Image: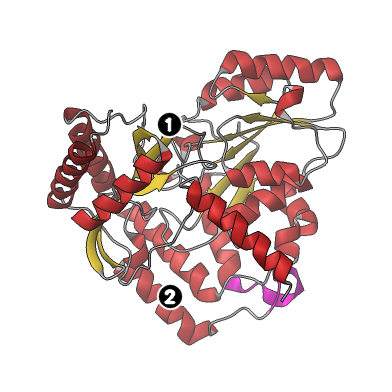
């Protein structure tokens, strides 16, 4: 091993520790749910994306087991070389129907869907206009493209600020870009607020721009049967590119791009993560089809998710916590100071509650928060237990709301 390189790594890690930005993952020792065993402790889990409880749903589990018996455990190849099984095709057809689009292409993850789609649809004659709070996978996907995108050049608009978005569109028109791509999260992953999609779409149509939405946290949460933010606002046919995730509300793993048949064909030919990644194990596709069946035919998980969301937000508000204007199950509890947020996480875990501290660089310096997410598997007793722990820790540390 190169000693100088190892010393450099050690120095960088120590810097993270000194700045209270060092992360150590906790180990889940039970199936995902509202109460779990983690690092040897039973805790109420408020840091899971398993919104509808489908990660451990009996129908989803059985579909995966049945698929192993039929298909084995691996696809054996990249999709275009020979790894596309009929179960993969069935999943994409089901997703397209669910999203009410012409076609869907599934990627191995939401991150790879962004990094595959964004560079594939842009050239050096194009521009990306992006919300300043967009997810890291959007930012990295944009950086991989040859298009103009830098904030210093005016292509990042203030969060949900439609006047600033219109400014950027007018600037793009003046500069004569071939294509203008507006990209936004549907539900913002650290704040829990919803993008003003009707206004974004209207501006895009006025300025002949393309709209792409990353709906990772809207999938399974908003819209008809959880079809997402486009469904929530009734914007069918007016959003050019929709990214969805298969690892949050649907409970398994993967991501997808929904749009036109031409878009799918182009990404099959030019989406590099699709071209160079082995296909999902067939049991993943089968489990996802079963998860879609549950979402489309059983309204109870989504109803319970929103019941718990309203209860949790009310509990926090009644006890003086700042939830930063969240509109969705993603419910940040504002702290501000990075070290204090991490200490709250540590003490909450000792109290039997897991709520992850979110600090720089995931959010801006001085904007640390605990990100909490109620889900359909939490009981009212779980939430009451959690709010009491929050109050005890806050009072003990004298945290100001």
> Residue 124: which quarter of the image?
top right
Q: Residue 191 at what x, y percent from top left?
A: 43, 34
The answer to which of 4 and 320 lies nearer the viewer is 4
**Which label sits on residue 64?**
2
Separation of marks 1 and 2 at Cα, in angstroms: 34 Å
The residue depicted at 78 percent of the width and 44 percent of the height is: 145
> Residue 150: which quarter of the image?
top right
Q: Residue 61 at what x, y percent from top left?
A: 36, 73
**Which label sits on residue 193?**
1
Instruction: Please state the extent of the stretch shown in magenta in the rendering.
Output: 77-86
Q: Residue 21 at what x, y percent from top left?
A: 49, 48
Decide: is 327 above or below 301. Answer: above
Which of the two discs, 1 and 2, sits closer to the camera? Answer: 1
- Residue 112 visible from this viewpoint: yes
In the picture, the quarter occupied by the C terminus is: top left
**Mark 2 neighbour density, 10 Å: few (under 14) some (14–19) many (20 or more):** many
Q: For residue 283: magenta? A: no
């Amino acid at each position: 091993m190169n000693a100088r390189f190892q010393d450099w790594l050690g120095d960088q890690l120590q810097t993270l520790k000194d700045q209270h930005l060092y992360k150590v993952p906790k180990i889940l020792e039970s199936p995902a749910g509202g109460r779990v065993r983690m690092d040897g402790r039973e805790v109420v889990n408020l840091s899971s994306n398993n919104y509808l409880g489908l990660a451990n749903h009996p129908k989803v589990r059985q579909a995966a087991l049945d698929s192993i018996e039929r298909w084995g455990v691996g696809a054996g190849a990249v999709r275009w070389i020979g790894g596309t099984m009929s179960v993969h095709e069935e999943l994409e057809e089901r997703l397209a129907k669910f999203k009410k689009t012409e076609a869907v292409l599934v990627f191995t993850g939401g991150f790879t869907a962004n990094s595959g789609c964004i560079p594939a649809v842009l050239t050096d004659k194009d521009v990306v206009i992006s919300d300043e709070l967009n997810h890291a996978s959007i930012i990295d996907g944009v950086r991989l493209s040859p298009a103009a995108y830098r904030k210093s050049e005016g292509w990042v608009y203030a969060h949900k600020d439609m006047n600033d978005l219109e400014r950027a569109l007018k600037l793009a028109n003046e500069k004569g870009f071939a294509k203008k791509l507006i990209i936004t999260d549907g539900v913002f992953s650290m704040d829990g607020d919803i993008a003003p999609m009707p206004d974004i779409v209207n501006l895009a149509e006025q300025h002949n721009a393309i709209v792409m939405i990353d709906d990772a946290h809207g999938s399974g949460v908003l819209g008809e049967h959880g079809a997402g933010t486009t469904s929530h606002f009734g914007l069918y046919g007016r959003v050019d590119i929709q990214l969805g995730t298969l690892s949050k509300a649907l409970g398994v793993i993967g991501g997808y791009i929904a749009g036109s048949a031409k878009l799918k064909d182009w990404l099959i030919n030019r989406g590099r993560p699709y071209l160079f990644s082995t296909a999902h194990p067939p049991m993943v596709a089968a489990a996802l089809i079963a998860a879609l069946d549950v979402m489309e035919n059983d309204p109870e998980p989504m109803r319970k998710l929103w019941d718990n969301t309203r209860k949790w937000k009310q509990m926090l508000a009644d006890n003086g916590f700042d939830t930063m204007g969240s509109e969705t199950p993603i419910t940040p509890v504002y702290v501000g100071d990075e070290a204090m947020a991490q200490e709250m996480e540590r003490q909450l875990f000792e109290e039997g509650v897991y709520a992850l501290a979110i600090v720089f660089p995931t959010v801006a310096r001085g904007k640390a928060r605990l990100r909490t997410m109620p889900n359909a598997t939490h009981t009212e007793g779980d939430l009451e237990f959690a709010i009491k722990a929050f109050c005890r820790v806050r009072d003990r540390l004298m945290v100001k709301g």
